[in-house]
Image: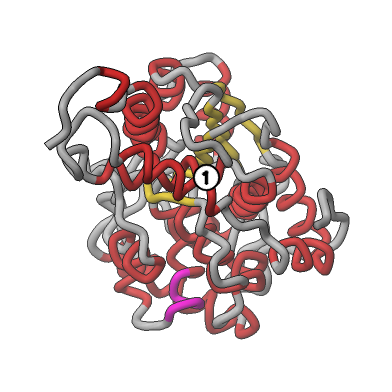
Amino acid sequence: MRQDFTSLAEFIEIIQELPSPRVSAREAAAARDACLTKPPGSLGRLEEIAAWYCGWRGHERARVEKPQVIVFAGNHGVTAQGVSAFPAEVTGQMVANFEAGGAAINQLAETFGAGLSVHALGLENPTRDFTQGPAMSESEFVDALMKGWQAVDSKSDLLVVGEMGIGNTTSAAAISLALFGGEAEAWTGAGTGVAGEALAHKATVVARGVEVNKSSENNGLEALRCLGGREIAAMAGAMVRARTLRIPLILDGFICTAAAACLHVAQPGALDHALAGHVSAEAAHPKLLKILNKEPILSLGMRLGEGSGGALAMAVVKGALACHSGMATFAEAGVSEA
């Protein structure tokens, strides 16, 4: 399959030819699990996670040794509609905080041994206000997808993608509405903390964006182009690159999951290499995860973004593989089986 792209047509070609996990490795991992020094099923979902991971990495005793967290940042023209409690300048200020090591994701990535990179995508040039037309041209969209694709370290073995972008819960809500229908109010949450009349206004903006961009309805890539932001498109590009390299992916919160949903609609099965790291307190996230058939690993009432929930879940995945690959079998330990 293609290992790079320069056009949307070539990107579509890639997502139509995504690799599958290695079934033999998953089966061997399951067989190993049955021989480990524990009662069958006693590690619960950790056993399922370990077999899933081994299948994607192609080794029955795989371990997580080089996890990667990528944070993409972008600014949104739709903030001109007054949808956020914070000004757009905060995006750049938070990028500086990431780069200085002062954000939550910095602490979590360090704690769990993950490499962290931050990519600011044209902050001085926000996407267009999607209530007036598409947020990005096709060339701008392809550039953002490519930025995400290129940010993935081919030597990493577990990926979390996060985001920073004032206004991007509005984009995520609009994407969800375009792809899955319903009422704008059901997809629109507090984001940075809007409530009351401000929240109702935000839902109106979401509905208007979908109405203006009819081509986005039930069309994953058009929804991403017309209603997304550069950082949301970059997350999707990174997710696809991870799949081509058989790097398992952990989804973060509502915005990350909205990016993933675009791929799900564009190509069924595109998220087979992904687990949901957590369920966010952002109101629509549980609904979106249910549509994608992704059971979250954690539920901690978080709604920070940045990849924070995914990074925490990374610890669970690392623990699952440490147990699976490091434990002794009954034969190795000289323990009698039941």
Locate the C terminus and report the quarter of the image it occupies.
top left
Question: In the rendered view, would you say 100 is above or below 135?
Answer: above
Question: In the rendered view, would you say 21 is above or below 205?
Answer: above
Residue displayed at 50% across by 58% down: 272
Dividing the picture into quadrants, the one containing residue 1 is bottom right
Q: Position of residue 238 (x, y in %)?
A: 64, 46
Residue displayed at 85% across by 61% down: 7
Side (left or right) of 173 relative to 335 = right
Residue displayed at 48% across by 37% down: 60
Side (left or right) of 332 relative to 307 = left
Q: Can residue 164 be seen by looking at this rendering?
A: no
Q: Position of residue 290 (x, y in %)?
A: 32, 67
Q: Can residue 284 be seen by looking at this rendering?
A: yes
The answer to which of 189 and 240 lies nearer the viewer is: 240
Where does label 1 land, which residue? 25
Side (left or right) of 195 relative to 61 = left
Residue displayed at 18% across by 22% down: 335
Q: Amino acid at mark 1?
A: Ala
